[in-house]
Amino acid sequence: MPAIAIVFAVAAAFATQAKTESSSALVDAYIPMGPGQPCENTGLKCETIQTEFICTVNDQQAFGLRNPSDDTSCSVDLYYPEQ
């Protein structure tokens, strides 16, 4: 019985650690400037993990880059981290 409790505790610790690491991955937030135009970096960092609050700058939704090497690809929904 104690061995099962230890296995469960270790598994729970790994599951908690994975959640913590993924929720702390912040990305740059961009504002689309128009079709084919480079997106404007806002200097703000938000996360891709869905929370209750959409990432915005001056009441405009901000997005992450779908392709980091293409600054016209800002179409990934971003969210403010939960606190």
Image (cartoon, helix red, strand yellow):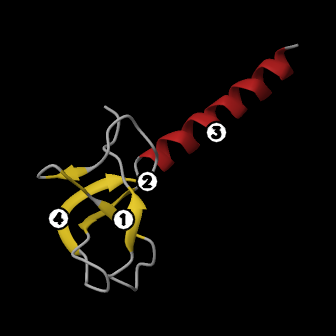
Give the quadrant of residue 36.
bottom left
Q: Is residue 74 above or below residue 5?
A: below
Q: Residue at x 48, y 48 (%)?
A: 21
Q: Is residue 31 above or below residue 80?
A: below
* Proximity of marks 1 and 2: CB atoms separated by less than 8 Å: yes
* Residue 48, numbered label: 2
Q: Secondary structure at mark 3?
A: helix
* Proximity of marks 3 and 1: CB atoms separated by less than 8 Å: no
Q: Residues within 10 Å of mark 3 (few under 14, many from 20)?
A: few
Type of amino acid under label 3: Phe
Please state if 46 lies on the left or on the right of 58 as rendered.
Answer: right
The span from disc 4 to disc 2 (Cα, nearest Å) is 16 Å
* Proximity of marks 3 and 4: CB atoms separated by less than 8 Å: no
Type of amino acid under label 2: Thr
The span from disc 3 to disc 1 (Cα, nearest Å) is 28 Å
Residue 11 in percent (x, y) is at 72, 33
Closer to us: 27 or 40: 40
Residue 54 in percent (x, y) is at 32, 45
